[in-house]
Image: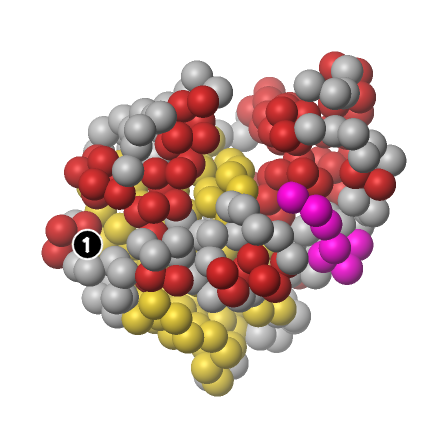
């Protein structure tokens, strides 16, 4: 690691304060160009520890930048991984207060819920499907704390991969009852189609993203516990939202979920 413990703690406090106060900042690598990947995930871990210490409950894990469309949109080349806590979760059809966010965007997700532990390294698509209880439709609301959504990979990892809000729902299906690669995805904003895709847009198969997450955690001596909810990453590029917008996601076989923005 290139950064000392005090610097990591200070950066974590700064980024979480930006999230809680809905204010932006310049990417942290501007002042710390030498920070490494371990530093970035250490900052993220410190943010999670602070939330848990204040009473937040773990709600799952997330994969980010897993589609070629998202990678191109954000100018990065590798997936990233983050955490979900209960304060991010909202019910299907609920209203999201945009005053608590900076510049929110929405992206369609295929969510996994595990029936048994996943541990890497060596995890693969088959391992994920065998460990999955069911899959669901989901919408993630991302909200980078970096000004104008401009960041590099290390900065966005430290910022918990822009996590802000999420909803899952629709129709729970066992993974062997659907072809996750060919599932059609339609996202509408105010009744107009704004994004189209299929599950294969996520690294060729959404379970590949979950396998990468398990292998990433395995290298750090961790696993994904049974019962964990995992957002496998945006199927399409993210779409900006503002007050008054109503977003509906329809996923073939998995039903629909929606959010309103106020």
**Magenta part of the protein: which range?**
147-153
In percent of the image, x 74 and y 55: which residue is there? Answer: 150
**Viewer-closest of 160 and 198:** 198
Position of residue 158 measured from the top left corner of the image (x, y, whole percent): 66, 35
Outermost residue toward the right?
31
In the image, residue 256 lies at what x, y percent?
33, 67
Q: Is residue 193 above or below residue 227?
A: below
Q: Quadrant of the N terminus?
A: top right
Q: Please state if 13 lies on the left or on the right of 125 as rendered.
A: right
Q: Is any part of residue 153 visible from this angle? A: yes
| Residue 82, image x, y percentages | 53, 38
Q: Judge whether residue 254 is colored magenta.
A: no
- What residue is rendered at 54% in x and 60% in y? 70
171 versus 29 height, above or below: below
Q: Nearer the viewer, residue 112 or 33?
A: 33
The quarter holding residue 159 reads: top right
Q: What residue would you read off at disc 1?
A: 173
Give the x, y percent position of residue 189: 51, 77
**In the rendered view, does 124 fall on the left or right side of 223?**
left
Question: In the image, is 128 to the left or to the right of 185?
Answer: left
For image coordinates 68% across by 51% down, the residue present is 144
């Amino acid at each position: 690691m290139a950064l000392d413990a005090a610097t990591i703690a200070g950066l974590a406090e700064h980024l979480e304060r930006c999230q809680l106060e809905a204010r932006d900042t310049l990417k942290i690598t501007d002042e710390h160009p030498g920070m490494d990947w371990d530093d970035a995930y250490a900052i993220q871990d410190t943010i999670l520890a602070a939330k848990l210490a204040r009473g937040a409950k773990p709600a799952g894990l997330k994969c980010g930048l897993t589609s070629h469309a998202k990678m191109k949109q954000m100018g990065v080349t590798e997936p990233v991984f983050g955490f979900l806590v209960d304060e991010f979760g909202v019910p299907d059809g609920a209203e999201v207060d945009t005053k608590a966010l900076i510049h929110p965007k929405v992206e369609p997700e295929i969510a996994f819920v595990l029936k048994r532990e996943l541990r890497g390294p060596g995890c693969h698509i088959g391992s994920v499907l065998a460990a999955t209880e069911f899959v669901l439709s989901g919408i993630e609301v991302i909200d980078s704390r970096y000004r104008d959504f401009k960041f590099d990979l290390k900065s966005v990892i430290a910022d918990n991969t822009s996590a802000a809000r999420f909803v899952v729902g629709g129709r729970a299906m066992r993974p062997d009852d659907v072809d996750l690669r060919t599932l059609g995805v339609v996202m509408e904003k105010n009744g107009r189609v704004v994004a189209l895709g299929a599950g294969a847009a996520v690294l060729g198969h959404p379970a590949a993203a979950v396998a990468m997450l398990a292998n990433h955690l395995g290298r750090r001596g961790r696993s994904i516990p049974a019962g964990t909810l995992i957002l496998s990453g945006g199927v399409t590029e993210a779409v900006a939202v503002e007050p008054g917008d109503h977003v509906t996601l329809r996923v073939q076989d998995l039903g629909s979920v929606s959010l309103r923005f106020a």
